[in-house]
Amino acid sequence: MTDYQAFRVELKDKIAHVAINRPDKVNAMNAAFWSEIVDIFQWIDDTDDIRVVVLSGEGKHFSAGIDLQLLAQAASQMGSDVGRNAERLRRQILKLQSSFSAVDSCRKPVIAAIQGYCIGGAIDLIAACDMRYSTLDAQFSIKEIDMGMAADVGTLQRLPRIIGDGMMRELAYTGRTVDGPEAKSIGLVNRTYPDQPSLMAGVFAMAAGIASKSPVAIRGTKEMIRYMRDHRVDDGLEYIATWNAAMLQSADLKVAMAAHMSKQKPDFAD
């Protein structure tokens, strides 16, 4: 397993645990974070032995978002030419976007476990995950508005499909803080837990259940859900028909049927 500067990564029982590991910096997203997350999720995507991912933050907080030193460094690189500055900033923003697109496009389900602060860029990150769970005392905020900017790494594009357009606008325009219970009520998280130990236990139990399913069926299901975000219903029906014309020939169906008939737990190949 590779050693990372901004993450701790473990693989056990077909579950990859990816933990942001800068607790002394409130898990702020520094330069290493943005490059390493791409490498980590490429490894996850390429490794058949991994069936599901748990994404968490070490310490008291999930993440306080982008490291302000990174923003200061970007500002220091600006010159006197507006056009060249704009081109440089655009390339940097697109590169940051690609880091969270690596999470979104991962073939395996990604479950976010959130405690404490989940602010700014951390909202962009969890919006790219499949499911989100939190502690009761978690604090969510689209903080960019208070920094005089619009969120630009995925929140405004992905969050409306999770919590609805009107609620997303309220949070984006006001920057107000949402706690765990309200996050659950608006659909930002699926479930809340009283504390971090129970959160992690619940999330890993959920991950274990997903890991026990047919990996072909799980990956196909995620692909169809992602496809439907940007296509019409008839396009989606056409795509799943073509997809399953191949995937229904998988041995996983025979394994699942035999296990169901014999009341045994199925054992699927990676």
Image (cartoon, helix red, strand yellow):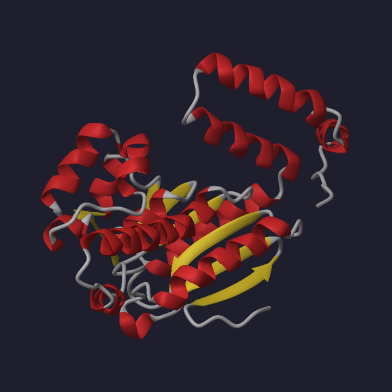
Give the quadrant of residue 91. Answer: bottom left
**Residue 108 vertical position relative to residue 68 in the rendered view, above or below:** above
Q: Is residue 63 visible?
A: yes
Q: Quadrant of the N terminus?
A: bottom right
State the residue lying farthest toward the bottom: 24
Q: Position of residue 31 (x, y in %)?
A: 41, 76
Residue 181 appears left or right of 191: left
Q: Position of residue 132 (x, y in %)?
A: 42, 51
Q: Residue, x 47% and y 78% (percent of image)?
A: 6
Q: Residue, x 31% and y 62% (percent of image)?
A: 89
Residue 235 appears left or right of 215: left
Q: Position of residue 206 (x, y in %)?
A: 56, 51
**Residue 145 vertical position relative to residue 161 in the rendered view, above or below:** below
State the residue lying farthest toward the top: 234
Residue 214 appears left or right of 233: right
- Between 130 and 59, the residue placed more toward the observer is 130
Q: Is residue 138 visible?
A: no
